[in-house]
Amino acid sequence: MQYAITGYFDEITESNITRFWKLMYDKGFSDYLYLSENRPHIKYCVFNEINEEMIKSKLAEYSKRINRINVHFHNIGMYINDELLSVVLEISATIEMLNLQKSICQDFKDSGRFVDENYFDSGIWKPDCFIGVGIPISKSNEMIDELRKWNIQYDGSLQKIGLIQYRPAKIIVEYNTL
């Protein structure tokens, strides 16, 4: 089981992304995000083990010090592992967002054991939001043809910060930001 400190979107953006999850489900590409207890989010950092009470307490305080962040979705991206791929909505990496992610990783490093991957390291991490996971590569051409029909360039905002446990997905806590 893994855990992530996450950012959650405004209601309209969340509704738009959930619609993408449903389209991925309806077309038979990916069902996990749509059927899970997940909500659209970005991950700031991921842990293999956590001190849950410490993170919940720190997040409550942290949420009172950070402002909502405007986001711009600008592209569709993919991650490929073995015979499966994941699809993301890429988000423009503003200085404000990069600084927030870096400070979260610094401020919460004593709250658990981070994953061994360097994906969340400063200078490597990039903001995105998953719209499909575990998609067989054999469906990639059909999926790309479908994705080309979608208008993915739009603006939204990150308005909450939270903690999620996943596989299976379960939101542990979330707090509004300023």
Image: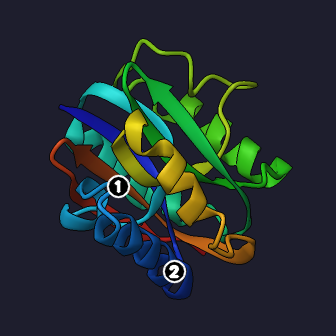
Instruction: Work out whether residue 129 can be spotted.
Output: no
Q: Using the image, determine if residue 143 lies above or below residue 12.
A: above
Residue drawn at x 19%, y 65% is 35
Q: 66 or 34, which is in the foreground?
A: 34
Q: Using the image, determine if residue 159 lies above or below residue 53.
A: below
Amino acid type shown at disc 2? Asn
Q: Using the image, determine if residue 176 lies above or below residue 121.
A: below
Describe residue 19's horizontal placement relative to residue 32 as left or right: right
Residue 33 on image: x %, y %: 30, 58
Q: Mark 1 packing: few (<14 Cα in 10 Å), some, or many (20+)?
A: many
Residue 21 location, quadrant: bottom left
- Sooner in the amino-acid sequence: mark 1 or mark 2: 2
- Mark 2 = which residue? 16
Q: CA distance from mark 1 to mark 2?
A: 18 Å
| Total marks placed | 2
Residue 36 location, quadrant: bottom left
- Position of the N terminus by quadrant: top left
What colour-coding does the image apply?
A: rainbow
Look at the numbered disc 1 and give the secondary structure of its residue: loop
Residue drawn at x 35%, y 67% is 27
Q: Using the image, determine if residue 131 lies above or below residue 159.
A: above
Look at the numbered disc 2 and give the secondary structure of its residue: helix
Amino acid type shown at disc 1? Phe
Q: Which mark, by number, is residue 84? A: none
State the residue lying farthest toward the bottom: 12
Q: Which mark, by number, is residue 29? A: 1
Residue drawn at x 30%, y 72% is 26
